[in-house]
Amino acid sequence: MALRINHLLAMPFFAAAIFVLTLPEATMPSGAALGGALALAVVGMWATGILAEHVTTLLFFLAAMVFGIAEAPAVFSGFSAGAFWLLFGGMILGSAVGKTGLGARLARAMALRMGVSYSGILVGIVAVALALSFVMPSSTGRVVLLMPVAVSLAEAFRFEPGSNGRLGITITAALAAVIPGFGILPANVPNLVMLGNADTLYGLHITYGEFLFLHFPVLGLLKAAFIVLITRTMFPDRLPDIGAADTVSTRLGPEEKRLAIILVGALALWATDFLHGVSPAWVALFAGVLCFLPPFSLISAEKIGDAIQIRPLLFIAGVLSLGAVVTSSGFADRVAEAFLSIAGLQPDDDFGNFATIVGASIVTSLLGTAPTVPAVWTPLAGELATAMDLPLKSVVMMQLLAFSTVILPYQVPPVVVGLQLGGVPMAQGVKATLVLAVVTLLILLPLDYLWWQALGMFDG
């Protein structure tokens, strides 16, 4: 029964893929059509779980190469992406956190400050994630740091794998470590891609404070509050009788001390990458490698297979490669051009233009990933601003409202990293992001429109 339901849910994706393949060459060149059809089919399979995520990913790699949809560097670009190696290093760190017991100790410290209640735990996780978003410029780095603690917190309170309590804690950590950070300029990569393209193409400079004031009240604080509300409602639970304080010792062991040194060093390097320029990915990998080396020797080199799981690594590589394939095949550009020809943008129709641009950008994010949006839409911002008689800055900033709206987890790879590190079944992650997306579309984006209007962002 479950399999038939999955097939039914995937049918719209497959139907859209077939439709793209039937478009005339003048409208959609064959290479772009193949790229779009493959992306739609793969997204449908990932979202509905017809096959295991890593099996779908292998089929994606195979089809892209066999049919010549993109060159090998684009098809396998996910393996060279920083997020892949952040997950790789994060798995090692997560294994060390669990093995040494440091995670349980950190979980206990968090629990004592949160108030001993399930809701208090969720609020505390979100508060820590928001605080990290201001000091750590890598969302994947925040996920890698926070998720092992969240897992240890669930274990300390005796929430079994698959229980509502464990799902609520881990999904909250995965979402909170990434999504509210879109309201903080340096906190997420797509923000920097958008601002970097705007600077390069138009000489447009946006300050940290200006960005924060425009986006953080709704996309940061309100969305963080809704993450707690949604996960608390979707995964209701209460604390068992045994508290976290009864599950950990009070003495810091030698292995915990050595791991604490590694984690503090990694956190310091992540928080100061604007000074030294070393990618958070290589910091995570270096920290992971240190766990195998003396004098730390936290994990035996022969046990590397226990610390690193191939399935989530394959999946995240596929997610990261998808955007490159969609872009290099030309499909994303064709979709954007088609939009411009039919959108019917009009001056003095602020709400209609706002909804149209944000909606089209969300579709672009669905076809690729969040970083695809600024890559496709920033070069069009000048033309769009003229058509709508809006300030260029406002048109550029509209993109953020779109790529911060996560409908399916694969759109934002760090969310996938968090779900994988937390052992969350993808179906449960999809449910949470779908509900958050509905809340965003029905409540938060209209509030954003009113906030922008109050700030004069639509004054030409």
Image (spheres, grey):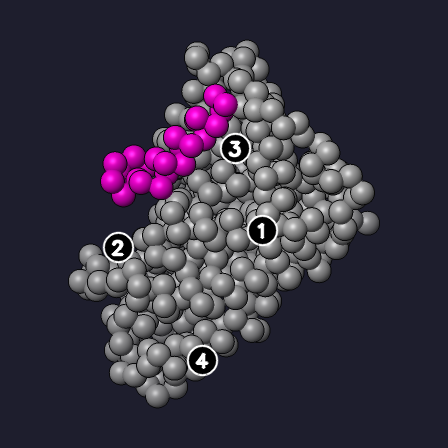
User: Can residue 72 be seen from the camera position used here?
Assistant: no
Where does the image place residue 256, in percent across and percent down from the top left? 54, 23
Q: Is residue 286 left or right of residue 196?
A: right
The amino acid sitting under disc 2 is: Gly
Q: Residue at x 39, y 86 (%)?
A: 349
| Element at label 4 | helix
Q: CA distance from mark 2 to mark 1?
A: 33 Å
First along the sequence among labels 2 and 4: 2
- Callout 2–callout 3 Cβ contact below 8 Å: no
Q: CA distance from mark 2 to mark 4?
A: 27 Å
> Residue 50: which quarter of the image?
top right
User: Mark 1 — residue?
Assistant: 124
The amino acid sitting under disc 4 is: Leu
Q: Residue at x 32, y 86 (%)?
A: 347
In the figure, 195 relative to 423: above or below? below
Q: CA distance from mark 2 to mark 3?
A: 29 Å
Q: Is residue 381 left or right of residue 4?
A: left
Q: CA distance from mark 1 to mark 3?
A: 29 Å
First along the sequence among labels 2 and 3: 2
Query: The magenta stretch spans which residues?
Result: 257-280
Judging depth in this view, the residue of 456 and 51 nearest the camera is 456
Name the outermost residue toward the left: 203
Of labels 4 and 3, the one closer to you: 4
**Alpha-carbon neighbours of circle 3 within 10 Å: few (<14), some, or many (≥20)?**
many
Q: Residue at x 49, y 14 (%)?
A: 297
User: Mark 3 — residue?
Assistant: 313
- Callout 4–callout 1 Cβ contact below 8 Å: no
Q: CA distance from mark 4 to mark 1?
A: 30 Å
First along the sequence among labels 4 and 1: 1
User: Mark 2 — residue?
Assistant: 196
In the figure, 306 relative to 443: above or below? above
User: Mark 4 — residue?
Assistant: 450
